[in-house]
Image (tube, rainbow, N blue to C red):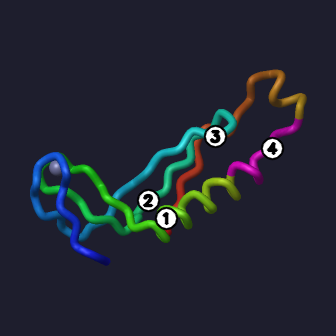
């Protein structure tokens, strides 16, 4: 992964892990342990293009799988959270 410098703080980032949270169809999808470059100052995470594309695909797939029966939806029953790690 290429070294990035935080555009806000002008600090060199370090290689670490981050967690992203997505809201799709009323559920929260949390993707953990995403490799990222992290700013030591503002904690902003910079994710490599191919990795963020992969995370997008993962979230799309999970939200497509989530299709509760109409009866449950009408009663407001929802799966609230899906957590995964890559
Ligand atoms: Zn920063």
Residue 39 percent location from the top left of the image: 18, 56
**Secondary structure of the residue carrying numbered label 3:** strand
Q: Are marks 4 and 2 in contact (CB under 8 Å)?
A: no
Q: Are marks 3 and 1 in contact (CB under 8 Å)?
A: no
Residue 60 percent location from the top left of the image: 67, 54
Disc 3 versus disc 2: nearer the observer: 3
Of callouts 3 and 2, which one flags the residue occurring earlier in the amino acid sequence?
3
Of callouts 4 and 1, which one flags the residue occurring earlier in the amino acid sequence?
4
**Secondary structure of the residue carrying numbered label 4:** loop
Please give the residue where the numbered disc 2 appears in the rendered image: 32
* Among the 4 quarters of the image, the one containing residue 33: bottom left
Please give the residue where the numbered disc 3 appears in the rendered image: 24
Please give the residue where the numbered disc 4 appears in the rendered image: 67
Disc 3 versus disc 4: nearer the observer: 3
Please give the residue where the numbered disc 1 appears in the rendered image: 85
Of callouts 3 and 1, which one flags the residue occurring earlier in the amino acid sequence?
3
Q: Are marks 1 and 2 in contact (CB under 8 Å)?
A: yes
Q: Is residue 11 above or below residue 67?
A: below
Of callouts 4 and 2, which one flags the residue occurring earlier in the amino acid sequence?
2
Mark 3 → mark 2, Cα distance in angstroms:
16 Å
Give the residue at x 41% y 64%: 34
Residues drawn in magenta: 63-69
Q: Closest to the observer: 62 or 51? A: 51
């Amino acid at each position: 992964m290429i070294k990035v410098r935080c555009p806000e703080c002008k600090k060199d980032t370090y290689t670490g892990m981050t967690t992203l949270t997505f809201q799709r169809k009323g559920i929260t999808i949390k993707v953990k342990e995403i490799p990222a470059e992290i700013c030591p100052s503002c904690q902003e995470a910079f994710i490599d293009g191919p990795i963020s594309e992969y995370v997008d695909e993962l979230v799309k797939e999970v939200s497509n799988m989530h299709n509760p029966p109409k009866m449950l939806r009408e009663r407001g029953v929802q799966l609230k959270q899906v957590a995964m790690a890559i």
